[in-house]
Image: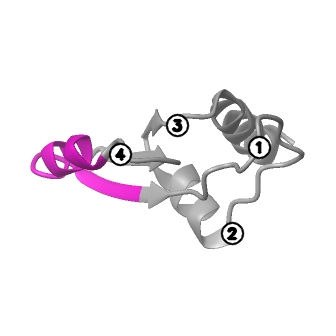
Amino acid sequence: MLKVVIVTDGPYGDRAYETIQMEFDAEFIELEKPSSTFMDELEIPENQMVKIKEENILITYTTHPDVTLDLIHMINKTLIG
């Protein structure tokens, strides 16, 4: 079965999760919202990163643009390097 993970750092994504989980194996992960405009480094707990890497499709509902960029870099770094 197709696995989907939805990652959010704000109030969005829960309705998408409710809809998607009716048809697919889905996970909903809430990250801590960055407190400033500029981020030093995104910290995602290891257990959540494992879930994110195991899924076939990643959907992000992030309000801070750096969260999505850093998340993709972290996934690619561990998969490639």
In the picture of the structure, the residue carrying the numbered disc 2 is: 46
* C-beta proximity under 8 Å, tags 4 and 2: no
Is 12 placed left or right of 39 in the picture?
left
Front of the two marks 3 and 4 = 3
Residue 62 is labelled as 3
The disc, 1 or 2, on the residue closer to the chain's N-terminal end is 1
Question: Of 37 and 32, which appears nearest the observer?
Answer: 37
The amino acid type, in three-letter code, at marker 2 is Glu
Badge 1 is on which residue?
36
Spot occupied by residue 17 in the image (x, y as percentages of width and height) = 25, 48
Determine whether the residue tagged by mark 1 lies in a helix, strand or loop: loop
Disc 1 marks a residue whose amino acid type is Ser
Viewer-closest of 42 and 72: 42
Q: Position of residue 10 (x, y in %)?
A: 47, 47
In space, the residues marked 1 and 2 are separated at their CA atoms by 23 Å
Query: Which quadrant of the figure has residue 75?
Result: top right
How crowded pointer 2 is (Cα within 10 Å; few <14, some 14-19, many 20+) is rated as few
Tell me the CA gap for discs 4 and 1.
29 Å
- Cα separation, mark 2 vs mark 3, equals 19 Å
Q: Which residue type does callout 3 highlight?
A: Thr
Circle 3 packing at 10 Å, graded few (<14), some (14-19), many (20+), is many
State which mark lies toward you, 4 or 1. Answer: 1
The secondary structure type at the circle numbered 4 is strand
Q: Residue at x 69, y 69 (%)?
A: 46
- Where are the magenta residues, as a range? 14-28
Q: Residue at x 17, y 51 (%)?
A: 18
Check if residue 55 falls in the magenta segment: no
Q: Secondary structure at mark 2?
A: helix
Question: Pointer 4: what residue?
Answer: 4
